[in-house]
Amino acid sequence: MTTAKPLRVGMVGYAFMGAAHSHAWRTAPRFFDLPLDPRLTALCGRNDDGVRAAAGKLGWGSVETDWRRLLERDDIDLIDICTPGNTHAEIAIAALEAGKHVLCEKPLANSVEEAERMTEAAQAAAERGVFSMCGFSYRRTPALALAKRMVEEGRLGNIRHVRAQYLQDWLSDENAPMTWRLDKSKSGSGSLGDIGAHSIDAAQWVTGQQITGVSALLETFVHERPLAGDLVGLGGHGDVGADAPRGTVTVDDAAIFTARFDGGATSAGAVGVFEATRFALGRKNAMRLEVNGTKASLAFDFEEMNVLSFYDAAESPDAGFRRIFVTEPEHPYAGNWWPTGHGLGYEHGFTHQVVDLVTALGAGAQPSPSFADALQVQKVLAAVEGSAAESSRWQKV
Ligand code: SOE
């Protein structure tokens, strides 16, 4: 039985991300030694029957139907925001001002203005020992964390190229029904903010360089989709007939952009090519990153998430790319799980996210990525939208 002080969590939202976060809060203290002991204290959702059923299934101790009640409760230490982006700013700012730590799903907000207000509130709260983090969970994939370690160790030399794709296909069917992710007033943008944001954050974090400018185009392939009752969750091809009432898609289906990076602390900035789409038929969750340096290259594809491919120019040319199976005890996070070779899954990134958040909170330190880090991603998203709106004209970030 742990002697660690409880960290009592109130979570808002219980769909896909709510389920992933619940799993992480339950699992992290069972595989990692944490300075605080996460407790699934309260789950919040607007529909009383729905939130009660979800709380029973996901393991939450109580329920609320108004997130404001979570802020009034003195048995809640941290608010976990797993709701669409249009709700992030109001909930996060109020929670920070109420003295609650905050974990907020990505992207941070639906606009730079909102992200700036959230960052200001986060910086003011941090001075009072109240901290916040944005949930770019792919940083916690062992292979990507190893990639960052290798760049930091200088194994790649100076970085010249970044190539980032995030390819899904769950909207390829034009009769796939509407969802909040296709409604700009809720999601802020489409593939750009939902999955492109992951690529932007991962590229900047692994290389240690920030994007300084972009040239972009956005495309919407399917402008209207069947409404299957309320806006439905991710995917879900519901049994809607072709004559069902249709809603208007108000976001991008695909985002493509080039980028310049600032060079970080090392050298001339890298150049990058980014692509995010939900129409790459056959690609299910191919979050890919390739980095080419002066000494070596690395490549990652989430659809083989336990592998990092590495090419070292110092080795004989016929050595080719090595396939590093990132399950050794010395690899990031891997030693806390299974014997080498047994592999991890999508949910482990969320568990590692809780580990790093709780470790930082236990030390009274700022967790990473901070809201300020997430604001930088938000500025890149806005620059992409600005460029696309002006015939791909170069936009500074
Ligand atoms: C949908 O595209 C989605 O669920 C994203 O919202 C998540 O952030 C990503 O991890 C998986 O795909």
Image: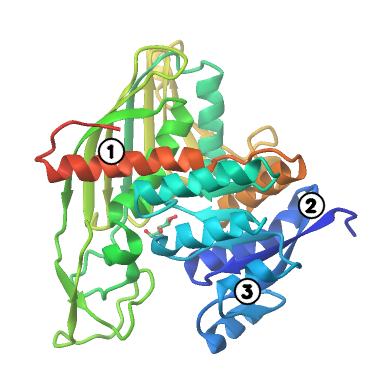
Q: Residue 372's x, y, as percent?
A: 49, 39
Which numbered circle lies on residue 36? 2
Where is the C terminus found, in terms of image quarters? top left
Crowding around mark 3 (Cα neighbors within 10 Å: few <14, some 14 to 19, many 20+) is few
Crowding around mark 1 (Cα neighbors within 10 Å: few <14, some 14 to 19, many 20+) is many
- From what the image shows, is residue 127 above or below residue 15? above
Crowding around mark 2 (Cα neighbors within 10 Å: few <14, some 14 to 19, many 20+) is many
- From what the image shows, is residue 129 above or below residue 14? above
User: Spatial distance from mark 1 to mark 3, Cα to Cα?
Assistant: 41 Å
Residue type at mark 3 is Arg
Tell whether 128 sits left or right of 148: right
Q: Report the mark closest to the observer, 3 or 2.
A: 3
Residue 306 visible to an observer of this rendering: no
Which numbered circle lies on residue 274? 1
Tell whether 396 sits left or right of 102: left
Residue type at mark 2 is Leu
Tell whether 339 sits left or right of 115: right
Q: Report the mark closest to the observer, 2 or 1.
A: 2
Tell whether 63 sits left or right of 113: right
Which numbered circle lies on residue 69? 3
User: Spatial distance from mark 3 to mark 2, Cα to Cα?
Assistant: 23 Å
Q: Residue 83's x, y, as percent?
A: 47, 66
Q: How many marks are shown on the rendered structure? A: 3
Q: Residue 303's x, y, as percent?
A: 42, 49
Q: Residue at x 11, y 41 (%)?
A: 390
Q: Residue at x 68, y 74 (%)?
A: 60
Residue type at mark 1 is Phe
User: Spatial distance from mark 2 to mark 1, Cα to Cα?
Assistant: 38 Å
- From what the image shows, is residue 56 above or below residue 98? below
